[in-house]
Image: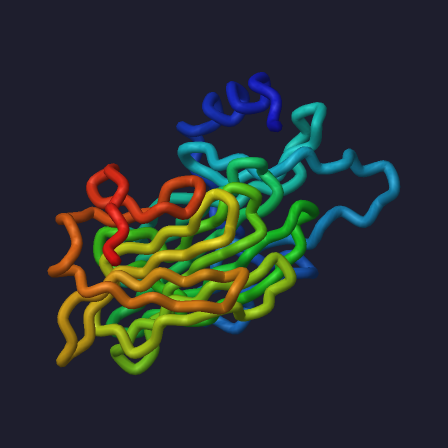
Amino acid sequence: MIPQALLAAMLARADRPPAPSAELPPQVYFGAELGRPFLPVLPPRADDGAPAPAGWLAAPASLVLAAKDGTVLHELGVGRWSAEDGALRREMRGAASKDGRSAWHWQKVAEGEKTASVLVYLGAHGQILRRLDGADAPAGLPPAALSGDGAILLAALRTDGAWTATAYSFGGKELASVTKAHRVTALSVSEDGRRALVAWSGLDLPEMVTLLDLRRGERLDLPAERLPAGPWTLAPDGTLLAAGRPVPRTP
């Protein structure tokens, strides 16, 4: 668990948005290929005297990797910024797992009609477990969801006008996917990481609620019209919820 003192310190920093660097540092995990680079993600500290990480923390204006004594090891910006002329727009989001073991950070840059986006799945020492170019945020949703222990990431990607939602293990392995979706309206992972949920619809398909059993490799597609009205999500134990209430199983 992350100390309360650290949480208070991060909240106190919320009013100070991170400033983009004019020059990239020597080592950057991603973003260097863009004409207007993202804020950098630095590699973990290599010196032997560096404090051991305590975990990731999502503060209002940043995503922070901190040591047990409160030392900030990494800080990634969260928010929206734009150039004075409005030509360049940058959006960044992030979230940490409940236990602070892992996190995800997403960045999207738009310049004119051109856009570029990338999401990284981050481990406890700041290492990148998986990089997802083209990851995007469906309307009204974040681009990803984490299990409570951070061992499962469910992320949305948009390619050629179609959505794909894929679950990844902590080792970066693809576990299951929902593909060729026209719209994605819900993304959820159970706290224990056993199940994932994707609510979606296709061009010629009605809305579906797909349940993915990530341990058994099984999939269940439920027509939304046969379920109680949403929003749909998963309880900590993987039970399907509609508007916060368990959905009874049908024979």
The answer to whether residue 85 of the structure is visible from this angle is no
- Tally the marks: 0
In the rendered image, the vertical position of residue 50 relative to residue 207, given as above or below: above
* Front-lying residue, 79 or 22: 79
Q: Is residue 76 visible?
A: yes
Name the residue furthest front: 251
Q: Is residue 217 above or below residue 121?
A: below
x and y, in percent, of residue 83 in the image: 31, 54
Residue 232 spot, x, y in % from top left: 25, 49
| Quadrant (top left, top right, bottom left, bottom right) of the C terminus | bottom left
At horizontal 50% and vertical 61% (from top left) the residue drawn is 214
Q: Which residue appears at 52% of the width and 64% of the height?
A: 216
From what the image shows, is residue 103 above or below residue 129?
above
- In the image, farthest residue toward the right: 48
- Residue 166: which quarter of the image? bottom left
Name the residue nearer the viewer: 85 or 32. Answer: 32
The residue sitting at 47% across, 39% down in the picture is: 62
Colour scheme: rainbow
At x 34%, y 76%, the residue is: 179
- Where is residue 86 shown, x and y percent of the image? 25, 57
Q: In the displayed structure, does residue 105 sit left or right of residue 50?
A: left
Placement of the N terminus among the 4 image quadrants: top right
Q: Give the image location of residue 224, x and y in percent.
A: 17, 60
Task: Using the image as rendered, state which of residue 77 and residue 223 is in the foreground.
Answer: 223
The quadrant where residue 139 appears: bottom left
